[in-house]
Amino acid sequence: MTVLARTPATALAIAAICLVSAFPARAERADRDKPISLEADRVTVDDKKKVQVFDGHVRLSQGSLAIQAERIVVTQDAAGYQKGVATGAPARFRAKREGRDEFIEGEALRIEHDTRTGRTEFFDRAVVKSGGDEVRGQFIRYDATSETYLVNGAREGAAASSAGNRVHAILQPRRNEGRPAAPADSKTTKE
């Protein structure tokens, strides 16, 4: 691993913190207090431009959060917000959901997360899984603030008329907590 900066250890630590803060905020809050483990073939830090670039077989973990990509670029604006862009064939992330015993997993050729908007966007061959639910499309946007998804079957500007450009979803039935579960077998026997 190569680090280009005036003080390599400090620059790498700051870059790793920026990288983790720039990716999905849906992970468990407890993950934020865990150590960051980062592997890459090369890391470049530009403090003046506030850009960190992680290249080659990038593996990052912090608690339940795991990100794998060929390249991750993190930029920071003047207000301190970060934007992370992970690319790969595909780029992947996995994290335990806050307060739930389930994970959220996502992959796409490009994954972008913006801390200012709280949005995570997946571009090209996008898949997001949570619990037993799964959604596939060419573009997926998750807004952590409103907890809403937008899924397009086609890339922006392309027609979504062919079967390959449609959204595919598997959604598990939700039990209403106030209503008892349906019996497993509707047949009853009396003696």
Image (cartoon, rainbow, N blue to C red):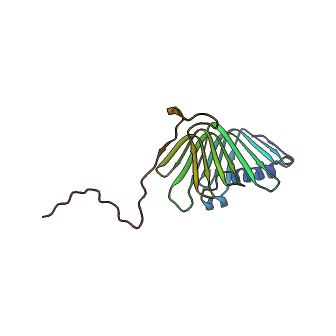
Residue 62, compared with residue 165, is above or below; it is below
Dividing the image into 4 quarters, which one contains the N terminus? top right
Q: Could you tell me residue 4's position as x and y percent?
A: 82, 42
Residue drawn at point x = 70 percent, y = 44 percent: 85
Quadrant location of the C terminus?
Answer: bottom left
Which residue lies most toward the left here?
191
Residue appearing at x 56%, y 35% in the figure: 160
Q: Quadrant of residue 189?
A: bottom left
| Number of numbered callouts drawn | 0
Please give the name of the residue rendered at 80% of the width and 46% of the height, measured from the top-left corner. 51
Q: Residue 87, position in %: x, y?
A: 67, 39
Q: Position of residue 100 (x, y in %)?
A: 52, 60
Q: Quick check: 7 left or right of 63?
A: right
Tell me where residue 183 appears, x and y as whole percent: 29, 59
Q: Which of the pair 168/55 is nearer the observer?
A: 168
